């Protein structure tokens, strides 16, 4: 019979009820204010591990970076400090699965017998929250994956780095380091201490102590390896419990970092590539030219795009995807073909007019729900010229790309036209509707 490590801190650090937990994680992810589209995803995240009411917004900022990794990352190597049971080394559990209210996660048991610092300890995992609180976020963002959970006790920088190196893998593997920052200082003192620690993390210091970060042992090992591998590192967010749900007399600090292999993909390079894919896909259908190559790994991330065709400056077709559900390269190619040949407003593009056509590709960010009580509050939140909007009500849905602001610059008129596009009356009560916004990166030939 399979051994299961049950959820130990559900109902304390996060909700026990599955629906309540899913809603809270979704709300935290939806509250991340970074709307820009992104390409690629981190190899490593450094994430806090307090109760969600305290560190949830900072953790969500980190896990939002993994949204493009869904369907690619199938393995998570998770390291966090022990809080309750001392252990020498890095402890694997004997269990075959970790349970959370959102479901069961299989535990991978890699061959590490030649590494004496890797031990087995069920007690070290039994009530440990530093690993468990990460799992609902990972389940929501990645879907299905296997887990390599390591509860880290006394170990050297080199011992930790050696284990992470062994488990590094390829694009199917992401590494997560679970750590909070300073503990129980006054608010201003904590901010000063944490600022200094954050600067040292950004410089790949490997002598951070446990007064500065409770997960210093796994963090130092990771930073040692990351420096050797020449990873880039970026601070995503930082605050403390005094900024969220606690008083300011004694606070706990939180931060989140993303580390990338080879740096992030530049939008300029990506735009040239996506335009070539769109044009190549159309010419494959129209002129029987070879299908475009999609060898780059970042084209395998899930992505949502729109492809727009113009002819002599006039719209000639526009088809797109609102939610990322297939590889980015595939999405662009499919939408390009649909825009050229299946937009119901236009006849299929012909070989004679194709030389006069120009291609535009828009890459959408993950839509974020907007929270508002009435139309006035919604209008106040909308950023004219920047936001694309998705409006859903009574089983109907419509969207306007940010480019539509060029022809409808007034917010009220923009909303009215979006209601009409969705097949709704302009006097529809917006408080009954779900409105989400997104941003785009766009490229035009």
Image (tube, grey):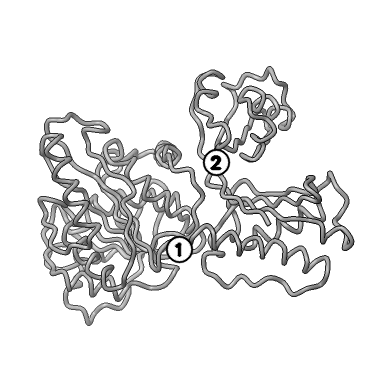
Crowding around mark 1 (Cα neighbors within 10 Å: few <14, some 14 to 19, many 20+) is many
Crowding around mark 2 (Cα neighbors within 10 Å: few <14, some 14 to 19, many 20+) is many
Q: Is residue 288 left or right of residue 377?
A: right
Which of the two residues, 8 or 377, is positioned nearer the viewer here? Answer: 377
Quarter of the view holding residue 292 = bottom right
Where is residue 147 shown, x and y percent of the image?
36, 63
Give the quarter of the figure containing the C terminus: bottom right
Marking on residue 199: none
> Dot 1: what SS?
loop
Whether residue 18 is visible to the viewer of this picture, yes or no, is no
Label 1 or label 2, whichever comes before in sequence order: 1
Q: Which residue is at 59% across, 61% downward?
A: 327
Q: Which residue is at 44% across, 68% downward?
A: 172
Q: Which residue is at 45% across, 64% downward?
A: 74
Give the quarter of the figure containing the N terminus: bottom left
Where is residue 48 shown, x and y percent of the image?
26, 48
Whether residue 346 is visible to the viewer of this picture, yes or no, is yes
Which of the two residues, 196 or 434, is positioned nearer the viewer here? Answer: 196
Quarter of the view holding residue 85 = bottom left
Q: Is residue 33 above or below residue 444?
A: above
Where is residue 197 shown, x and y percent of the image?
17, 51
> Dot 2: what SS?
strand
Name the residue that disc number 1 marks. Answer: 73
Q: Which residue is at 26% across, 45% downward?
A: 9
C-alpha separation, residue under disc 1 versus residue under disc 2 = 24 Å
Q: Is residue 68 above or below residue 367?
A: below
Name the residue that disc number 2 marks. Answer: 438
Where is residue 217 shown, x and y percent of the image?
16, 61
């Amino acid at each position: 019979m399979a051994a299961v490590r049950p959820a130990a801190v559900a109902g304390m650090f996060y909700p026990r009820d599955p629906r309540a937990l899913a809603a809270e994680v979704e709300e935290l992810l939806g509250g991340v204010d970074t709307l820009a589209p992104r390409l690629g995803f981190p190899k490593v995240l450094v994430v806090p591990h307090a109760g969600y009411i305290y560190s949830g917004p900072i953790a969500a900022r980190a896990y939002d970076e993994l949204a493009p990794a869904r369907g690619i990352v199938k393995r998570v190597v998770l390291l966090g400090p022990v809080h309750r049971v001392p252990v020498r080394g890095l402890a694997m559990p004997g269990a075959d699965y970790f349970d959370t209210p959102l479901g069961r996660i299989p535990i991978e048991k890699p061959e590490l017998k030649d590494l004496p610092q890797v031990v087995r300890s069920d007690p070290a995992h039994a009530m440990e929250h530093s690993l468990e609180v990460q799992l609902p976020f990972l389940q929501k963002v990645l879907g299905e994956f296997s887990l390599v959970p390591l509860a880290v006790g006394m170990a050297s920088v080199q011992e930790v780095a050696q284990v992470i190196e062994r488990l590094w893998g390829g694009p199917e593997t992401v590494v997560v380091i679970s750590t909070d920052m300073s503990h129980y200082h006054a608010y201003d003192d904590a901010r000063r201490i944490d600022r200094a620690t954050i600067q040292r993390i950004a410089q790949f210091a490997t002598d951070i102590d446990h007064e500065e970060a409770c997960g210093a042992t796994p963090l130092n090992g990771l930073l040692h390896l990351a420096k050797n591998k020449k990873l880039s590192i970026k601070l995503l967010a930082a605050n403390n419990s005094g900024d969220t749900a606690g008083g300011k007399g004694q606070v706990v600090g939180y931060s989140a970092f993303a580390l990338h292999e080879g740096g992030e993909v530049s939008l300029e390079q990506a735009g040239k590539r996506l335009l070539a894919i769109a044009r190549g896909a159309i010419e494959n259908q129209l002129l029987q030219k070879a299908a475009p190559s999609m060898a780059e790994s970042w084209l395998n991330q899930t992505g949502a795009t729109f492809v727009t065709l113009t002819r002599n400056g006039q719209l000639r077709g526009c088809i797109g995807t609102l939610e990322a559900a297939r590889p980015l390269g595939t999405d662009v190619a499919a939408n390009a073909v649909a825009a050229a040949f299946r937009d119901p407003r236009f006849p299929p593009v012909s070989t004679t007019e194709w030389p006069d056509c120009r291609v535009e590709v828009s890459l959408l960010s993950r839509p974020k729900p907007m929270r508002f009580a009435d139309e006035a509050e919604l209008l106040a939140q909308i950023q004219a010229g920047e936001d694309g909007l998705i409006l859903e009500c009574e089983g109907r849905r419509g969207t306007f790309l940010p480019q539509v602001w060029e022809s409808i610059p007034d917010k009220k008129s923009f909303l009215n036209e979006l209601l009409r596009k969705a097949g709704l009356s302009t006097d529809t009560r917006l408080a009954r509707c779900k409105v989400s916004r997104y941003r785009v990166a766009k490229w035009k030939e």
